[in-house]
Image: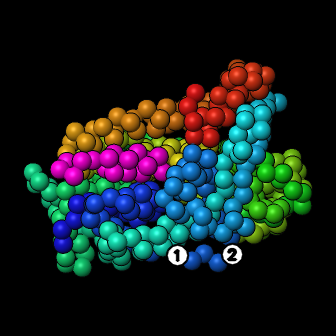
Amino acid sequence: MDFDLIIIGGGLAGASLAVALRASRLRIAVVETHLPADVPGWDSRIYAVSPENADFLREIGAWRHLDASRINPVHAMSIRGDAGGSLEFSAYESGLPELAWIVESGRLHRELWETMRRQHNVTLLCGISPVRFSQGAASVTVGLSDGRQANARLVVGADGVNSWVRQQAGIAATFTPYDEVGVVANFRCERGHRNVAYQWFRPDGILALLPLPGKMVSMVWSAPAGCAQELLALDADSLCRRVADATSGELGYLKLETPAAGFPLRLMRVDTTVKSRIAVIGDAAHAIHPLSGHGINLGFKDARELASVLNGLAPWRDPGEIAVLRGYARQRAEEPFLLQNTTHVLNRLFGTANPVLTVLRNVGLNLTDRLPVVRHALVRYAAGGRF
């Protein structure tokens, strides 16, 4: 089987890249072991999609097919320190319609797949895995678990933080474990959230509540491993009380809507995101702490930029040419680097019990809250713009 582009990994980043190339001349294969699953009820995996990336999803035709009753805007954000510090963000005060959109991962994933199924230039290779990899001067050959092999001028690894493509291509990755677990769950609240996203920096981790439609919120508690195991072992009523106490009853009594689940947190940096005929995007290219909410947004921006480069190629240009891929890499070098380092420093800053740092970090929150220019610049960057 011969293609111009093989995307290994059909998750959100890989699928959005394929859909963004729907009008291109490229013949595309998407290799994915697991099909998107139907999640009964509410999905416990929730993403805060920036306005810029919501626009990207609109441009590629996926956003309009999402169920509007399952999406919720974020109009404000309230951040609380562990010693009286606070910081408030408002979309209205910053001249924005919203700060983010809260979307269920599973529903967005299924819609991107349905869009791919309708594309004339995409071949879906589902339920199989890549098992062999060989690279020549003009193409890359990927051997598949069903015995077939596929050839392409460019292979994109969108296969997650433990990327097979990255390993086969010899792209070195450095992992820094946080010894933390992200505990996620959805709750129904006694009081309305008013489309506010909350975040508490606490001695036992960073707790965020994201507003879902109605009186519901999605929790992400980035907790030390021991504390996370305690949270995951609690029964529903005990977990609700624990979260309500940790948030000082901000939203009143809570009722658990989806069981709690946990995933380990770690930082991952790569030496490069491109080699000749190879590129990595999304979690295969960078993993960051979830406190900024930018993980999937970085992946969508990777897909958007790479699609822009490939869509703009002259017909005679080779999409796997290293000069082409280096242009993409330069465009995507700065933002992941800045966010990785910023979130890493914040995690370390709020993860220490040093009394001097405790005072400094809370003073910093209060000072930022009193400087509108700085505060609004941070809001616009978080919403997908630039400083």
Q: Please, is residue 296 above or below residue 201 in the view?
A: below
Q: Residues within 10 Å of mark 1 (few under 14, many from 20)?
A: few
Residue 41 is marked as 2
- The residue closer to the viewer here, 116 or 10, is 116
Judging by the rendered image, the residue that carries numbered circle 1 is 37
Give residue 210's position: percent from left, percent from top.
72, 53
Q: Is residue 31 among the parts visible in the rendering?
A: no
Can residue 40 be seen by looking at this rendering?
A: yes
**Residue 28 magenta:** no
Side (left or right) of 377 relative to 238: left
**Would you say 272 lies left or right of 82 here?**
left
Measured in 3D between alpha carbons, the distance from the residue under mark 1 to the one under mark 2, in whole angstroms, is 12 Å
Q: Which residues are magenta?
A: 300-317
At 61% from the left and 38% from the top, the residue drawn is 382
Q: Amino acid at mark 1?
A: Ala
- Element assignment for label 1: loop
Tell me which secondary structure the magenta stretch mostly adopts.
helix
Q: Is there a contact, CB below 8 Å, between mark 1 and mark 2?
A: no
Would you place residue 79 above or below residue 387 in this image?
A: below
Does residue 38 sit above or below 78 in this rendering?
below
Residue at image location 40% in from the left, 38% down from the top: 332
User: Which quarter of the figure has residue 11?
Assistant: bottom left
Name the side, left or right, on which 42 lies relative to 23.
Answer: right
